[in-house]
């Protein structure tokens, strides 16, 4: 790949990976520790990722279990989960916090699929914006000492790259939608 467009490929890769990590936080009826990725716990005055203050396990298909490294953290972890947007009420026995994921209704599944598709569209728009930036850059190059043919080849390479990422995003949206709709 030409060094002049490599930076745009890297930006598209970051956009795609960011979308995948967003998809991982969408809960699909099964317990998935990734839904807790964005939760921060007040650990002695410092907002700390939940994964760093306790052990997260999946003992059953629809149950997440959090065992804090320090028993005194149970309340803080519970508070952080309650104020988050995951919509699950934690229960604890004094030492361990359990999150029980309810079965998703058909309507809720359809809403989640709509949300996934919206996120996918936003990802495709971001990729197309990167393509636009790349083409603007190439037009500026064309005013310098780079031949028209070379610019055309680079523009074609950017378009192929864009098409590839859009295809990947469509595939990821399709897979996540299928996962959500599978009962």
Image (tube, grey):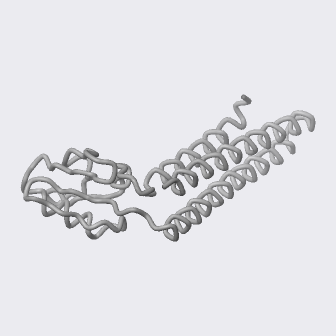
The residue depicted at 22 percent of the width and 51 percent of the height is 65
Residue in front for this viewpoint, 2 or 126: 126
Q: Position of residue 99 (x, y in %)?
A: 26, 58
The residue depicted at 67 percent of the width and 35 percent of the height is 6
Residue in front for this viewpoint, 134 or 115: 115
The quarter holding residue 12 reads: top right
Residue in front for this viewpoint, 155 or 69: 69
Name of the residue lying farthest toward the front:
183
146 horizontally vs 174: left or right: right
Q: Quadrant of the N terminus?
A: top right
Q: Position of residue 96 (x, y in %)?
A: 14, 53
Name of the residue lying farthest toward the top:
1
Q: Is residue 143 above or below residue 25?
A: above
Q: Is residue 27 above or below residue 1?
A: below
The residue depicted at 90 percent of the width and 35 percent of the height is 147
The residue depicted at 31 percent of the width and 58 percent of the height is 39
82 horizontally vs 73: left or right: right
Q: Position of residue 7 (x, y in %)?
A: 64, 39
Number of callouts in the render?
Answer: 0
Q: Position of residue 162 (x, y in %)?
A: 73, 45
């Amino acid at each position: 790949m030409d060094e002049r467009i490599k930076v745009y490929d890297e930006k598209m890769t970051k956009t795609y990976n960011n979308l995948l990590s967003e998809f991982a936080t969408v809960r699909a009826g099964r317990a998935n520790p990734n839904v807790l990725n964005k939760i921060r716990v007040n650990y002695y005055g410092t907002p700390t990722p939940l994964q760093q203050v306790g052990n997260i396990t999946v003992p059953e298909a629809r149950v997440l279990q959090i065992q804090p490294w320090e028993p005194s953290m149970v309340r803080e972890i519970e508070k952080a989960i309650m104020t988050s947007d995951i919509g699950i009420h934690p229960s604890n026995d004094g030492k361990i916090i359990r999150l029980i994921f309810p079965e998703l209704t058909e309507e809720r599944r359809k809403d989640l699929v709509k949300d996934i598709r919206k996120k996918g569209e936003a990802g495709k728009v971001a990729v197309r914006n990167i393509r636009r930036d790349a083409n603007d850059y190439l037009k500026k190059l064309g005013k310098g000492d780079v031949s028209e043919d070379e610019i055309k080849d680079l523009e074609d390479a950017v378009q192929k790259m864009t098409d590839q990422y859009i295809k990947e995003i469509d595939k990821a949206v399709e897979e996540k939608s299928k996962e959500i709709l599978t009962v």
